[in-house]
Image: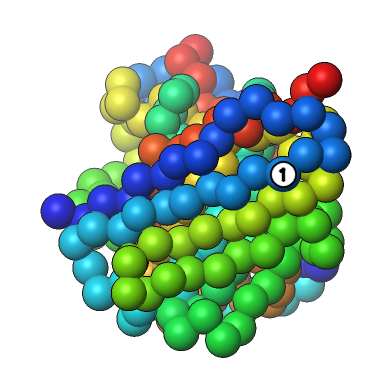
Amino acid sequence: EIVMTQSPATLSVSPGERATLSCRASQSVGSDLAWYQQKPGQAPRLLIYAASTRATGMPTRFLASGSGTEFTLTISSLQSEDFALYYCHQYNNWPLTFGGGTKVEIK
Amino acid sequence: EVQLLESGGGLVQPGGSLRLSCAVFGFPFSSYAMSWVRQAPGKGLEWVSGISGSGASTHYADSVKGRFTISRDNSKSTLYVQMNSLRDEDTAVYYCAKDRWNDPDAFDIWGQGTMVTVSA
């Protein structure tokens, strides 16, 4: 099983600042990597697929990069609605796996 | 409108069984692989099981293999998971999710979730 490790677990950021989230895979997943945003009491929402492609309707302030084992999600200027949990997800190999999540909170 | 509606959750005793359903609206169901993903209270996301568009191919997490069975009825646009020999650690919100295009793929559409509580 491919283990996905996200860091940091919690990120405290002021509105308007940049947030950088990391996701590492225990073995290469190529570009088969997605990012999701989840708010309390809601289902996850797809932000990014294929490591760097924004899902339909996602704001351009969400930028993602990486391939192989190292991936990054950057939120260029945090808005109030961006404070949430973020998960990475590999779909290169069965079983599919998620990272443990990064909580982006208001500083 | 594209929509996934889960149902069938509830309280069940350890060792018991439950069947969850996910009714799909707004897209050609048989053309897409689907998965079940769960989230224990206060915890992260865990992929549970996936099924191809035709239903011919299925996959399971080790934690549920041999106890859960995923299936689909393309004539009814409905996804199922039969959960047997339930354990305390199966307590979670269960989401159904649609693969974006390929099998497997990112999950572009999610249901609202249904809560399963396993407790004596």
Q: Residue at x 42, y 52 (%)?
A: B22
Whole-percent x and y of residue A33?
54, 66
Q: Residue at x 80, y 57 (%)?
A: B67
Q: Residue at x 58, y 29 (%)?
A: B10
**Residue A38 or B8: which is nearer the viewer?**
B8
**Residue A82 or B84: which is nearer the viewer?**
B84
For residue B89, what is the image quadrant?
top right
Q: Chain of mark 1?
A: B
Amino acid type at mark 1: Ser
**Residue A40 or B56: which is nearer the viewer?**
B56
Whole-percent x and y of residue A92?
62, 76
Q: Name the element at disc 1.
A: loop
Q: Residue at x 78, y 29 (%)?
A: B13
Q: Is residue B78 left or right of residue A65?
A: left
Residue under pointer 1: B17
In this orientation, does residue B79 appear? Answer: yes
Specify few, some or many for label 1: CA neighbours under 10 Å numbering under 14, 14-19, or 20 or more.
Answer: some
In this orientation, does residue A86 appear? Answer: no
Q: Is residue A96 left or right of residue A3?
A: left
Q: Is residue B23 left or right of residue B70?
A: left
Whole-percent x and y of residue B7?
45, 41
For residue A78, what is the image quadrant?
top left
Whole-percent x and y of residue A65?
48, 63
If the image is split into quadrants, where does the N terminus of chain A sit? bottom right
**Residue B14 or A52: which is nearer the viewer?**
B14
